[in-house]
Amino acid sequence: MKIKKGDTVEVIAGDDRGKRGTVRRVLPKEGRVLVSGVNLVKKHQRRMPTGGRTQAQGGVIEFEAPIHISNVMLVCPTCKKPTRVVYDTSSGTRSRMCKRCRAMID
């Protein structure tokens, strides 16, 4: 995958288009990423007993849902613009590089 945990990405499609956030989790089998502050959904949750002691909090909880990896684009740390990722293998190791400014990402 060209996007890793901790990368800054920008949403390029969907309701949250234009928002930027940090990747909190990558789900490679589903082809999705969890981005902080993006794709917020609300879930109505019932109060549940927890082992007979106290009740777990019920109500409407808001959380981030995973977004498809094709709807986000990596933001280059050097030029601060969304960019494609190319791989540089000239040094013998495979490292990510910004396609716009040719700066090393990691």
Image: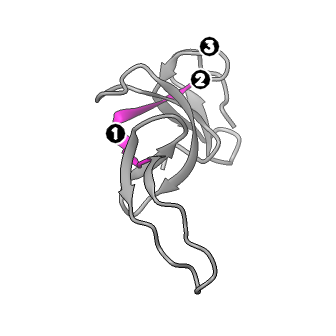
Where residue 7 is drawn, which disc sits there? Answer: none
Where residue 61 appears, as percent x and y from the top left, is 46, 50
> For the residue labelled by badge 1, is the local secondary structure a helix, a strand or a loop?
helix
Question: Which label belongs to residue 70?
Answer: 1
- Magenta stretch holds residue 69: yes
Q: Which residue is drawn at 61% across and 42% down?
A: 89
Query: How has the structure been colored for display?
Result: one colour
Q: Which amino acid does label 1 sit on?
A: Ser
Percent position of residue 62, x then y: 46, 45
Q: Mark 2 points at which residue?
A: 76
Q: How many labels does the image show?
A: 3
Residue 100 as seen in the image, left or right of residue 6: left
Residue position marked by numbered label 3 in the rendering: 79
Q: Which of 14 and 59 is in front in this view?
A: 59
69, above or below 98, in the image:
below
CA–CA distance between discs 1 and 2? 17 Å
The amino acid beneath tag 2 is Cys
Residue at 39% in and 65% down = 46
Asked if marks 1 and 2 touch (Cβ < 8 Å), the reply is no
Whole-percent x, y for residue 7 in the image: 61, 37
Q: Give the range drawn in magenta.
A: 64-76
In this orientation, does residue 28 appear?
Answer: yes
The answer to whether residue 26 is above or below residue 21 is: below
Mark 1 and mark 2 lie on one chain; the one further toward the N terminus is: 1
- Asked whether 70 falls inside the magenta stretch, the response is yes
The CA distance from mark 3 to mark 2 is: 6 Å
Q: What secondary structure is found at the residue carrying circle 2? A: loop
